[in-house]
Amino acid sequence: MGKEQEISTLRQQLRAAHGDVVSSLQNQLEQKQQEAEQREKQFEALSKETEDLKNKYCAVSERCDTLEKQKVPSGELAVVQEQLRDALEKNHNWLVYDQQREAYVQGVLARIKELETQLNEANQALQQQHKETSSDGQSGQVAQRELEAERARVSRTQTELEDLRRRYEEKSREATQAREQLLEDRKREREALQEERRCSSERSARLQGELEEERKRVAELLMQVNLLQKSLMNQKEEQKRIAFLEQQIQLSAKESENDKLDRQTLQHQLQKVLKELRKARDQITRLESAKQQRESRFSEPSSYNRMDFERLTIQDQTTSPSKVHNILDESILECPNCGASYPTSQHRELLAHLDYCFS
């Protein structure tokens, strides 16, 4: 009975150990499946974000290439260049006008000087004629007419001179106004050009800053893409590991079922062996009892007659020790664990072997 309890205890421990292993593997499998589902969701979100980042990266790359390869001036710069050409053309026109006006003024001044010279000469001629008239009374009337004519010519000359001065003053005022307007236009154009240069510098600096930010963002996107790729690789490896664990769990479950079947077979064989052992023990007990009775009968021959002796001899021949051993040797017992064979007469050695084999 002690051996049967020990075998039963071993079977329970084996069943509990396999149950713990299978339960642990199932818990790990469920946990891994939950983690796999979470990672699958994360992977889908990261994949979508990766596609968005790739699209943004392509757009940024195209924009960077456009900004780096752009050689045609922008619309504002073209307008400024057109304004600059217009200002240069106006400046050239004002310079031509200024030169023409200066030549005209120089001509007017030369004409004024010429008229003044003529006036002085006429005054000198009048004075000379007056002197001559005073010295010669006969030519007074002729001189008087010449004097009147000279005076009229001098008056016309003075009128023309005044008109030329007036025109000169008007032209001078126009030249002054034109010069002031030219200076004002030049100042305004310089200020506009400086403002445009400042705006262009600020715009260039802003575009350069945006370009640097886009480059940094592109670098970050590339880093995120690399991390996503690594995460994808890890996800694939984890999926392989989960598949391997599932396979191991299936194998463990199959082994557990096989062990269960083996335990059932072992239990059946043990019951059969124990049944045969009980039969063998009962038979041995009966044989030993018959042997003791036979020996006691042989020790008292006087109490038996010839017919009893013959019947005892026949019974002795029927239940002789060699016959008993032959009967016991014909029944073979096997170890359910390793399959070792033992005759029924060596049941004690089989029990010792069972203790050693299941220990």
Image (spheres, rainbow, N blue to C red):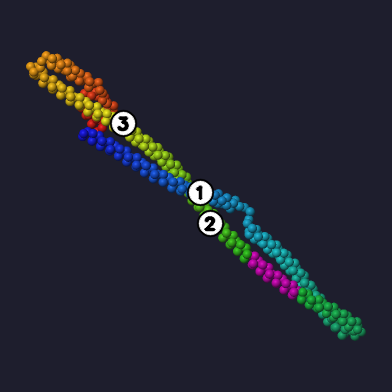
Residue at which label 2 appears = 209
**Label 3 or label 1, whichever comes before in sequence order:** 1
Q: CA distance from mark 2 to mark 3?
A: 81 Å
Element marked by disc 3: helix
Element marked by disc 1: helix
* Residue occupying the point 45% across, 46% down: 40
Q: Which one is in front, 146 or 318?
A: 318
User: How many numbered marks does the figure carry?
Assistant: 3
The percent position of residue 11, horizontal first and vertical second, equals 28, 36
Q: Is residue 42 left or right of residue 84?
A: left
Q: Is residue 47 left or right of residue 113?
A: left
Reply yes or no: does residue 317 show up in magenta. no
Residue at which label 3 appears = 265
**Label 2 or label 3, whichever comes before in sequence order:** 2
Q: Is residue 130 above or below residue 354?
A: below
Q: Is residue 131 left or right of residue 253?
A: right
The answer to whether the residues at label 2 and label 3 have Cβ atoms under 8 Å apart is: no
The answer to whether the residues at label 3 and label 1 have Cβ atoms under 8 Å apart is: no
The range drawn in magenta is 168-190
- Label 1: how many Cα within 10 Å (few below 14, some 14–19, many 20+): few
Q: CA distance from mark 2 to mark 1?
A: 29 Å
Q: Which mark is residue 48?
A: 1
Amino acid at pointer 3: Thr
Q: Is residue 112 above or below residue 65?
A: below
Is residue 1 in view? Answer: yes
* Residue occupying the point 43% across, 48% down: 38
Which quadrant of the figure has residue 281? top left
Amino acid at pointer 2: Gly
- Label 3: how many Cα within 10 Å (few below 14, some 14–19, many 20+): few
Q: CA distance from mark 3 to mark 1?
A: 57 Å
